[in-house]
Image (tube, grey):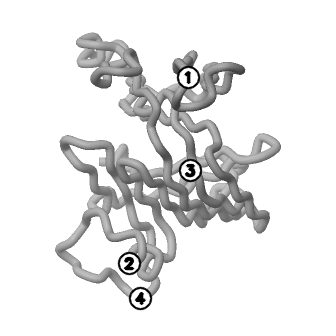
Amino acid sequence: SVLKLACIQVIGPSNGYLVQADRDDTKFWAWKHQQALGYTFEYKAGPPDDDCVTAMDPDEWRETVKSGFQVLPTRLMGKIHGHDGTKGGVLKGQGNPGFCDFDFTFTPLCGWGDADGEQKSTAGWLASFAVFEPHWQVTTADARATGTVTWQNTTYNFQNAPFYAEKNWGAALPIKWYWTQCNSFDGFMSSAEPQLSVT
């Protein structure tokens, strides 16, 4: 299908934007019962095993992946060799080239709907109906992240920075959408204090 696509979009400093995409979705992997997914656009010296499309140990991933990403339950890693989309698309050559490299871990403080209980579905049973696309799920409403991001040759190191993550999917994604999210309120910043995250 022409609709098949594996893609990552990264928003950076000063309204910067990078996207990398590939129509070969057979290299995409995800875990069924835990937050984890990834895609390898290019290996440094060929895939380690043609039959193995799954998460890698972080050290192995850094050694073998030239371009791609893997999102693990508490770690995000990526080497994005993409473009800014200024020429009207997400596929290779449809924008000015750019680079982003990231590797950081995060400690979840609360999910969606309950700081002390189980993660809730953002839209509940309504998420099963296509009329409500695009679907979205807040996967981490509040967390603290430590690691490194390199954006266009500038490296940012951070420790215990506020972190938020969500997943969007569906066949009817709009060209643009706007949302507001904050998990950095005075009096709600440490794991010993009550948590507050507004989306």
Secondary element at tag 2: helix
Q: What numbered label is drawn on residue 45?
A: 4
Q: Which residue is mark 3?
A: 90
Residue 93 can be seen in this image:
no
Tell me which numbered mark, 1 or 3, is placed earlier along the sequence: 3
Q: Which residue is mark 1?
A: 193
The furthest residue to the front = 192
Using the numbered discs, state the Cα–Cα distance from disc 3 to disc 2 in whole angstroms.
28 Å
Contact? badges 1 and 4 (CB < 8 Å): no
Tell me which numbered mark, 1 or 2, is placed earlier along the sequence: 2
Of residue 108 and residue 173, the one placed in the foreground of this image is 108
Contact? badges 1 and 2 (CB < 8 Å): no
Contact? badges 4 and 3 (CB < 8 Å): no
Q: Quadrant of residue 34?
A: top left
Q: Residues within 10 Å of mark 1 (few under 14, many from 20)?
A: few
Contact? badges 3 and 2 (CB < 8 Å): no
Q: Residues within 10 Å of mark 2 (few under 14, many from 20)?
A: few
Tell me which numbered mark, 4 or 3, is placed earlier along the sequence: 4
* Amino acid identity at mark 4: Ala
Query: Of circles 1 and 3, which is in front?
Result: 1
Tell me which numbered mark, 1 or 4, is placed earlier along the sequence: 4
Q: Which residue is mark 2?
A: 60
